Amino acid sequence: MDDNNYTVYVDPRGEWPELQPLIAKIQPEAYPIASLPKTVREAIAEVQGFVKAPLPLVANSALGALSLAIQPHVNIRRAVKLEGPTSLFLLAIADSGERKTTCDGCFTQAIRLHEIEQADAAKPLMEDFDASLAAWEAKRDGLLAAIKQAAKSGNATEELENNLRNLERDKPDKPLSPRIILADETPENLAWSLAKLWPSSGVVSSEAGAVLGSHGMGKDSIKRNLALFNVLWDGGTLPIGRKTSESFTVRDVRLTVALQIQESTLQDFFDSSKGLPRGTGFLARFLIAWPDSTQGTRFFSEPPENMPALAAFNRRITEILKMDLRFKRSGGLDPFMLDLSTEAKAEWVGFYDGVEAQLRNGGELYDVRDVASKTADNAVRLAALFQVFEHGLEGKAVAVDSLIAGAHVALWHLSESRRFFGELAYPQDIADAAKLNAWLIEHWRNKGAREVPKNHIRQYGPNELRDKQRLDGALELLCEQGRARLFKEGRRVIVEVNPALGGEL
């Protein structure tokens, strides 16, 4: 579009064409609270009634606690050679101040108390370990000194070397103490903690920008660290090589991720990483929630004297935490294997096939096929968590009711992913127009002006639209949709915003 060929309105105050939607909006669906286990849904309703945070955000906190408590105990098998963790990756896209930290605190009370109790119980063991290690190191130093002296004197060292080898085998093991809830860990620290300190943890944060925006997600390391998260979700093995310190291997560990991030921060992360979070399948593994804010409606109410439903939830979490963990000789976890009952397996196969059929070109899920392809896996993880929370390991098979409940929740999160990532999946010209539309409205809000020179947009508008060709394409689309129009003022081209967009301020 050449500047000389713009449509020029002789009277820019004339009537506007009917405003057209720029992009198709997917309407949010109601959260399937009724599908959750009774104790879980009653606790969510109780917390939501007091905290007044968005319901999906409260539910995410509860699901994160289930995943944290249960993930080290059980794996889930969908079919022969199709088995894996029950861990969840959860991501709430919401503004700061939505009270995620408060919600997390409600549902992780039992987990935090368990950590404190176990740390206290481990203190005498740590004291014994420190003494044993000091004695071991003294013996080792003595043997090394004796070997050095014997070698210097030309004497035989074979017996001393054998003693050293035997001593190495007797090095005392440091007692482990649960380190379950982590916060803003860098990927490097997370990997070390899981491999060396405790093999089942969760990154729980209301400021995911501190996690996704860490130096570990810089341009030189982001691909490696996204791969780490993918491997942890899959329950795989990953060697970590280090140049300046001990190398190690992350194996037989479990990780839950429960984050909240602002929409703009997630978009910045996506843009700065050049699409890697989706291209590598990182974001596809997350159960995403994009709830409407409740800010402005959370009027004061007196705190309840007690919260019996939440107390019942935390009692059950405590019972699960006190179940004995199984460890392999190598030190990693050795969880029980849960299978699907015959009825649940048939239900899951139907669910899997139904989702798969919509991934083809032209299918309803084609634009989010990366996310949709993980939905059946997340459904069965949720089903396993619900089964264990309600019934423990009795029977070691997931009932069909738990599978159906997990499928309902997984489908809701898929719908949320479609709503959010839909904008990212649009062609570039529509995405550019959407960004320009948002910028023009923001400019109107801040400056009180519906008119802005085109050159001002090129100077101060969205970075991508400082390219003349892309800006022209975005302006043309906004004009076609009745959202803006162009006129000349001398030699300047002026962009005028449709006053009907005032409803979007």
Image (cartoon, rainbow, N blue to C red):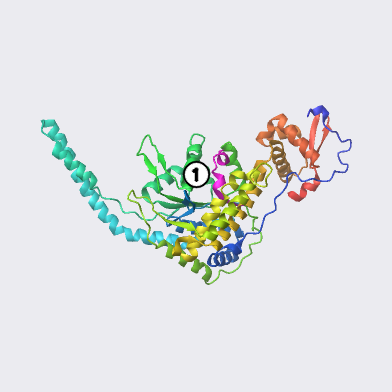
Quick check: can you spot residue 101? no
**Label 1 neighbourhood size at 10 Å, few (<14), some (14-19), many (20+)?**
some
Q: Position of residue 200 (x, y in %)?
A: 42, 53
Q: 502 or 425, which is in the foreground?
A: 425
Q: Residue at x 57, y 60 (%)?
A: 405
Q: Disc 1 marks which residue?
A: 230
Question: In screen coordinates, is 99 left or right of 183?
Answer: right
Q: Quadrant of residue 43?
A: bottom right
Q: Residue at x 10, y 31 (%)?
A: 153
Question: In screen coordinates, is 433 left or right of 329?
Answer: right
Q: Position of residue 396 (x, y in %)?
A: 45, 61
Q: Which residues are magenta?
A: 276-289
Q: Is residue 278 magenta?
A: yes
* Residue type, numbered disc 1: Asn
Question: In screen coordinates, is 94 left or right of 387?
Answer: right
Q: Is residue 407 magenta?
A: no
Which quadrant does the N terminus fall into? top right
Q: Position of residue 441 (x, y in %)?
A: 73, 44
Q: Is residue 471 above or below residue 187?
A: above
Q: Quadrant of residue 163?
A: top left
Quick check: can you spot residue 243? yes
